Image (cartoon, coloured by chain):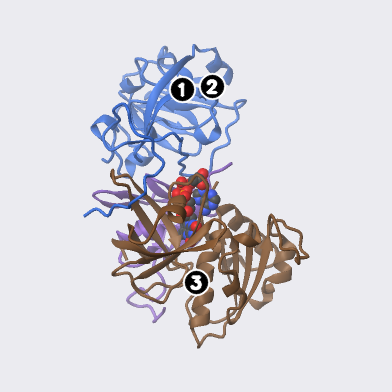
Amino acid sequence: MAVFTRGFGGRRPDSERPVPPGQYLTDDFPVLSIGPTPNVDTSTWQLTIRTEEGAEHRWDWAALQALPAEDVTVDIHCVTRWSKQDTHWRGVPVDAFFADVETAAEYVVAHSFGGYTTNLPLDDLLDGRAWVVTEYEGEPLEPLHGGPVRLLVPHLYLWKSAKWLRALTLHLDDEPGFWEQNGYHLYGDPWSEQRYG
Amino acid sequence: MSSWHAAQVVRTEPLAASARVLTLAVPGFAGALAGQHVDVRLTAPDGYQAVRSYSLARVGRDEVVELAVDEVRGGEVSPYLVHEARPGDRMEVRGPLGGYFVWRPHDGGAVQLVAGGSGIVPLAAMARARAAAPTSDAPFRLLAAVRTPADAFFAKELDSTEGLTTTWLYSREAPPASTRPPGRLTLDDVTAHAFAPDVGARVYVCGPTGFVEAAAALLVDAGHDAARIRTERFGGV
Amino acid sequence: MDPAPLDGNSLAGPLAGLFATDVTLVTGRCAHCGDVSVLAACVVYRHPMGAVARCRACTAVLLVVVEHPAGTRVGMPGLAWWQGPAGSTRTGAVGD
Ligand SMILES: Cc1cc2nc3c(=O)[nH]c(=O)nc-3n(C[C@H](O)[C@H](O)[C@H](O)COP(=O)(O)OP(=O)(O)OC[C@H]3O[C@@H](n4cnc5c(N)ncnc54)[C@H](O)[C@@H]3O)c2cc1C
């Protein structure tokens, strides 16, 4: 028994192209947070990839800038039911970071400054399907949206695109991250509405 | 208290420059305490939903919910409630909620209320509950910070409520007769108008998160026991 | 600008589907720093995926409340213990 509210429409434009089931378009970029915004300085920022064997690979800000970046235009989908079309980002394909990483692991946990984590299959980060991004709409990525550096995995719900990215750790088993431990889907494909686990 | 109740708007009244009172009929809603809130759920015709919390502006009547909502510009829900909702419109309500930020008529002792903007809503409910409880002789004081005189909720009533002393503090624009220049709440305001710490008043602070954190810190600086200060943050960046 | 958190009071709604009493009145101890407070006094970030309650003293995550369609789910990554209000036990005195 649904109770509808006359005249209430939220702030949504109409959808012209298909959006994933149960999603609504927005022109805003809502800021959703689970804690204080981490204050991450590019002069001390590092990205670490740690393999299941414990081998570590590190990039500081200068090393990140030296990698080939590209412009990316994608639609993003948040499990809280908003989608945003044609968002513009600039970043380095995750493939570039894995070029010299030896691993037999199939799973990754992305770690953020501030303690957030989320899990993904390694394959979903490769083949040009995911980026380590530093710019949004032509500007340096704001701290509120995960700056200076966040992950962008647009084919999965946006909680997989960890803000304030600090490390990627490799695992033989799929280890649930922050939301996944609390009832959200391990994979999170918006087109099959994999919201909850 | 755990499930959603169907609610219907029965009355709307202008309240202040950008705010209004909404009265909802909510069958099954009962037993609210002053200071409690409800969660309100709106569902658009296409199924899109939004949930926000609103304090009860008045308690004591079952099956009726009275809200006082201030418009947050560009917000998703408050502009709808302030400008669009009209009698007959339907929504859902969960509550009454929260047993911590409450005042009960048999709670003895002095009470200091500190409000920023719409944070006055649950505190007005407490002052109204105090006035409606003939047995209570608890002295109440209210420090209410507002932008301009036009933003003061329930001003006439709160200036003449039995047992309550109200001080309005203006942050942007004060009335001509006022001697205090407009500005944020200061330590001097707290020492001049709030109960002295040795009175041992229970303190309730409510408003936008930034206001609540600043006011609570000033109260502690003024010597109030942090353990007697209860807060209700309304949010905002 | 930091996103602004709320108080533990605001968890009363999300938790209403799970407990018969008002859980925001229970006292908890932070497993990280040892701070003891009622749940209503902790700091809450109301993310639409779930409410995240943090210790008011050290900001460690105490509790995560997800309104899952299969039922409300509460993760407690940071609570050493929870204690009900006085008068809530078999041996307790009459309280209010
Ligand atoms: C326990 C509780 C009780 C509350 N009681 C009342 C009440 O009695 N009356 C009332 O008017 N409001 C009350 N609020 C605030 C209310 O829940 C909403 O946050 C507010 O109406 C804004 O909702 P929105 O959908 O319009 O804005 P949103 O679309 O949620 O937000 C739009 C923008 O405004 C900012 N914002 C959100 N809330 C505020 C705020 N309070 N002040 C300033 N900026 C803000 C957001 O960060 C965002 O940037 C209460 C909140 C809580 C937690």
Q: Position of residue C18 (x, y in %)?
A: 30, 59
Check contact, mark 3 vs mark 2: CB within 8 A. no
Q: Colour of chain B?
A: brown
Chain ID, mark 3: B
Q: How many numbered discs, if any? A: 3
Check contact, mark 3 vs mark 1: CB within 8 A. no
Residue depicted at 56% across the width and 85% down the height = B137
For the residue pair A65 and C92, the one nearer the viewer reads as A65
Chain ID, mark 2: A
Question: Looking at the rendered structure, which numbered label has been put on residue A88?
Answer: 1
Chain identifier, purple in the render = C
Question: Looking at the rendered structure, which numbered label has been put on residue A130?
Answer: none
Q: Position of residue C53 (x, y in %)?
A: 45, 52
**How far separated are the C-alphas under marks 3 and 1?**
48 Å
Chain ID, mark 1: A
Q: Which amino acid, by three-letter code, is at mark 2?
A: Gly
Residue depicted at 45% across the width and 38% down the height = A30
Q: Residue furthest left?
A: A1
Is the C-beta of the residue carrying label 1 under 8 Å from the nearest atom of ligand 1?
no
Q: Residue furthest right?
A: B179
Q: Which amino acid, by three-letter code, is at mark 1?
A: His
Residue under label 3: B125
Residue under label 2: A138
Chain identifier, blue in the render = A
